[in-house]
Image: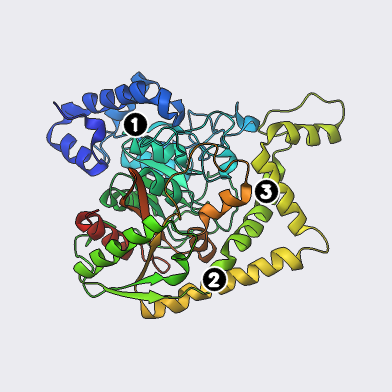
Amino acid sequence: MPIKLNELTLHESIDLLKKEPGKREKLLNDLFNEIDDRESDVQAYLELAEPEELREESKRLENLPLKGIPGTVKDNIQTLGFKTTCGSSFLQDYDSVYDATVIKSLKEAGSPVLGKANMDEFAMGSSTENSFFQTTKNPHDLSRVPGGSSGGSAAAVAADEAIYALGSDTGGSVRHPAGFCGVVGLKPTYGLVSRYGLTAFASSLDQIGPITKDVYDTALLLNFLATYDEMDSTSAAEGRKDYTEGIDRGIEGLKVGFPKEYFGEELDPRIQEKAKKWRGTFQDLGAEVREISLPHTEYAIATYYIIASSEASANLARFDGVRYTSRANTKSIEELFSKSRDEGFGPEVKRRILLGTYALSAGYYDEYYGKAQKVRRLIKQDFDRAFEDIDLIAAPTSPTPAFKIGEKMDDPLKMYLSDIFIVTVNLAGIPAMSVPAGQVDGLPIGMQIMGSSLSEKKILRAGHSFERTFED
């Protein structure tokens, strides 16, 4: 049976088109055919490019590094020619008026946009069940969630409905669905990738990252995504790097820590068993494996949800029924604001706005938001101390495999606890990548590799070595 080109990785696709430029048409046809075959079940996309327009744009970009190969974009990233709905009824008719910096960079490198991916509303959720439009399914088991909030992006890549995708990671929202869907997801160092054009959820935590079929693709995309941007006041003044350089060097001699706090009772025993194989694989690669402690991990969920909800409360104040958005039919300006927000926001978004507004209110600011910021500093210090003695940290991406659709929707706390291993990275501002690390009952599980700030090259080396060596 001839290979379907939509199943190739990005770097394999580039190599193919360098040798056989005429295969571009087949690559695009195979992508659209796969979407036609699977999308009604998976429901990863909210909007797709017109096939003929995409073919013309792909042809125009064929001599650039990414060879006109299209990518998929989470629907909270401004993308000219598409809507940017953030998965919300509030923005269901909002047309993007400019390209986010990451979209502009990828287009300049030769990658047009295939479509916009479904997501939890305003990136608030861990299952993509909070989308106003539809519930995305996990391609490995359609009765289960793909993770969130970048679930549409991860599901599209896992289902071969996309060569690669972009997501956003505020509290693990790239890594979590990557782990559930058996693909690679990177949350870069805070500030390494421009946030200009990303609809803000929690500005001190948000970061755009790639979701790919293998680690090399992640490194390749980071070459174009990691650029200084004067439009983003938090942009890191890093010069361009080749993140694929040295990726094959291996990790012999590196010290890898496994934090004991990530292997407690909340972790599925079957993943506990898999972790023994992860340790063995690192040792086989010549790394030194140690047990370490990150003592403030137990406070991470509470700290994260106070900070993230507080920042969301402020950022979402702009959605008032006047600008950008749908508006309620009312007779007074006060009623316009309140009724538009009541009708426009879904339950999870309202829950977090209420929590954040309360935490920021007079008399409670110091008790909640102020204290959460102090604990955030302690969590960051845990990582700083750990990286004085080790090079990388490895841990599960999620405490369980993908759960059933509807299983946790009536219990927000149980849903929030599915993020327990991933929110610490955003609080500390450090990079982390989830890589496929085996299966449990046919469902993928992920292992995340964490590093100190701007250590992406080291993380990519470790992930690349692990993915080529690990045997489930």
Q: Earlier in the sequence, mark 3 or mark 1?
A: 1
**Distance from label 2 to label 1 (Cα)?**
38 Å
Which picture quadrant has residue 301? bottom right
Could you tell whether 291 is left or right of 13 in the image? Answer: right
Q: Secondary structure at mark 2?
A: helix
**Colour mapping used in the image:** rainbow
**Distance from label 2 to label 3 (Cα)?**
22 Å
Neighbour class for label 1 at 10 Å: few (<14), some, many (≥20)?
many
> What is the x, y in percent for residue 6?
26, 32
Neighbour class for label 2 at 10 Å: few (<14), some, many (≥20)?
many
User: Mark 3 belongs to which amino acid?
Assistant: Arg
User: Mark 1 belongs to which amino acid?
Assistant: Glu
Q: Please tell me the numbered disc located at residue 352.
A: 3
User: Mark 2 belongs to which amino acid?
Assistant: Ile
Name which residue lies at 43% across and 67% down: 453
Eyeballing the image, is 236 above or below 70?
below
Could you tell whether 235 is left or right of 106 in the image? Answer: right
Find the residue positioned furthest to the top.
52
Q: Name the quarter where the N terminus is drawn.
A: top left
Q: Secondary structure at mark 1?
A: loop
Which picture quadrant has residue 378? bottom right
Could you tell whether 152 is left or right of 303 in the image? Answer: left
Find the residue positioned furthest to the right.
332
Number of numbered callouts drawn: 3
Q: Report whether residue 65 is seen.
A: no
> What is the x, y in percent for residue 228?
44, 56
> What is the x, y in percent for residue 194?
47, 52
Q: Earlier in the sequence, mark 2 or mark 3?
A: 3
User: In this figure, which residue is indicated by the disc labeled 1?
Assistant: 161
Foreground residue among 314 and 395: 395
Q: Please tell me the numbered disc located at residue 379.
A: 2
